[in-house]
Image: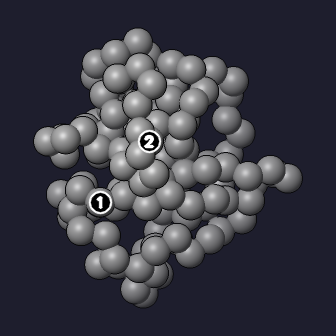
Amino acid sequence: MSLVIGRVGELRPGETKKFLLACDGGEVEGFLLNYAGEHHAYVNRCRHVPMSLDWVENQFFTEDGRFVQCATHGAYYRPETGECVAGPPCGRTLHRIPLRIEGATIVADCPGPLPDD
C-alpha cells in the first residue's frame, strides 16, 4: 500500500515526522527525515532490540544533527543510509521505507517483509 506522508518543503533539514503504513494486514510505524535537503524514510525500530528509536515524539536526530540515535541503547545510524556506525547493532542497517516524489507530495510504500530482530 502507498501513503502520502508529507509535502516537499514541509520538513526543514534536521526535522523528522512519524507515520503509519498499513502493510500485510498490520501497521508499520515509520519516520521521514530531511537530511541535508534529501528525504529518507525508515521503519521506527532499532536493529539491536525491536524498540522505537525516538527519545521524544518525532525526535530522531542526535543533538548535532549528524546521526539518527536510538533513545534506548544510544546506537548511531547514518541518516542517508540507515547504517549503524556506533552502538550494539553495528554492522546492521535500519529497514528503509521506499519513497517517491509525486508532484509536491512524498509517497511511502510498504518496505516488504521485515525479519525478526
Residue 89 image label = none
- Which residue matches tag 1? 15
Q: Residues within 10 Å of mark 2 (few under 14, many from 20)?
A: many
Outermost front residue: 56
Q: Residues within 10 Å of mark 1 (few under 14, many from 20)?
A: some
Q: Give the camera-side residue of 56 and 110.
A: 56
Q: Residue at position x 51%, y 25% from top? A: 47
Q: Quadrant of residue 110?
A: bottom right
Q: In x, y percent, where is residue 20?
A: 63, 59
The image quadrant where one finds the N terminus is bottom right
Q: CA distance from mark 1 to mark 2?
A: 12 Å
In the rendered structure, which disc, 1 or 2, sits on the residue that comes first in sequence?
1
Q: In x, y percent, where is residue 63?
A: 19, 41
The image quadrant where one finds the C terminus is top right
Given the image, on which type of amino acid does mark 2 rest?
Asp
Given the image, on which type of amino acid does mark 1 rest?
Glu
